[in-house]
Image (spheres, coloured by chain):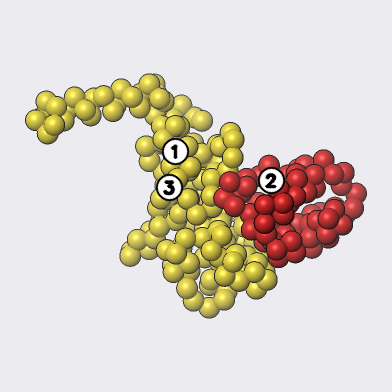
Chain colours: A red, B yellow
Amino acid sequence: MDEKIRSILAEHGRFPIDVSTLDENDDLFRAGMTSHASVNVMLALEDEFDVEFPESMLRKSTFESVDAIRAALRELVSVS
Amino acid sequence: MTSMSAGTAIRVGADVAAVHQVADSLARFGDRYLRRVYTEHEIACCAGTPSVVAAGLAARFAAKEAAIKVLRPSTYQPDWRSIEVRRSPEGWCSMSLSGHAAKLADEAGIAEMEVSLTHDEDVAAAVVVALCHSQSEHNNESGAHLRDLLLNGAL
């Protein structure tokens, strides 16, 4: 799962740095991901994992780190 | 927040968006991207050639981000669609809030919110200005309004 998350972040996150250098708890917004890029990341994650983020999860904290994204996806996958 | 007079203040938010990034999102995610971020009214207002659509949507995305800076959410961010740019038939734009965004505005005592949009080539930008009353001022005004209605026999 982490590999796919990092691949999506690299493709859609528009980071000014190499995503592979980010620790799983590093703040992705501080690392350069914009709010608009986070929308693309969210949609790409939905495509990849066949889930849909509900409104209750549409907050910056859901996408603020690799660890947070993994936790959100696990929650969605477990209920789908 | 900048104080203007006792109990009254203004908040300003500004943001920019790259038009080509919005165009890329449209090309990659299409209708799903549109429906998650923009309202029916906003989508209808941005109809036209692909470049016109992307520029209009980018300006609206910047306006939503600028509004969030004004609303200053401390817990979670409002749904993109709860912050709407409304365009009048004359072409002027205004902000319309609903849901969590409207609640945040009410809590901040925001009485009025205005927006200005612009775009040029690949850059779209928006500025949002809000006039706020402190909560005590807000309550006092509400009370005064209620008293006026009572005195005028409207209630």
Q: Name the residue under label 2.
A: A62
Quadrant location of the N terminus of chain A?
Answer: bottom right
Q: Position of residue B121 (x, y in %)?
A: 61, 67
- The amino acid on which the numbered mark 1 sits, given as a three-letter code, is Lys
Q: Name the residue under label 3.
A: B98
**Distance from Cα at disc 3 to Cα at disc 1:** 8 Å
The disc label shown at residue B103, or none: 1
Total marks placed: 3
Amino acid at circle 2? Thr
Q: Is mark 3 on a helix, strand or loop?
A: loop
Depicted B8 relative to depicted B110: above or below: above
Q: Do labels 2 and 1 share a chain?
A: no
- The structure residue drawn at horizontal position 71% and vertical position 48%, both measured from the top left corner, is A75
Seen in the image, is B132 located left or right of residue A55? left
Inspect the image, locate mark 3, and give the three-letter code of the amino acid beneath it.
Ser
Which residue lies most toward the front here?
A79
Measured along the vertical axis of the image, is residue B14 above or below residue B41? above
The tag earlier along the polypeptide, 3 or 1, is 3
Secondary structure under tag 2 reads: helix
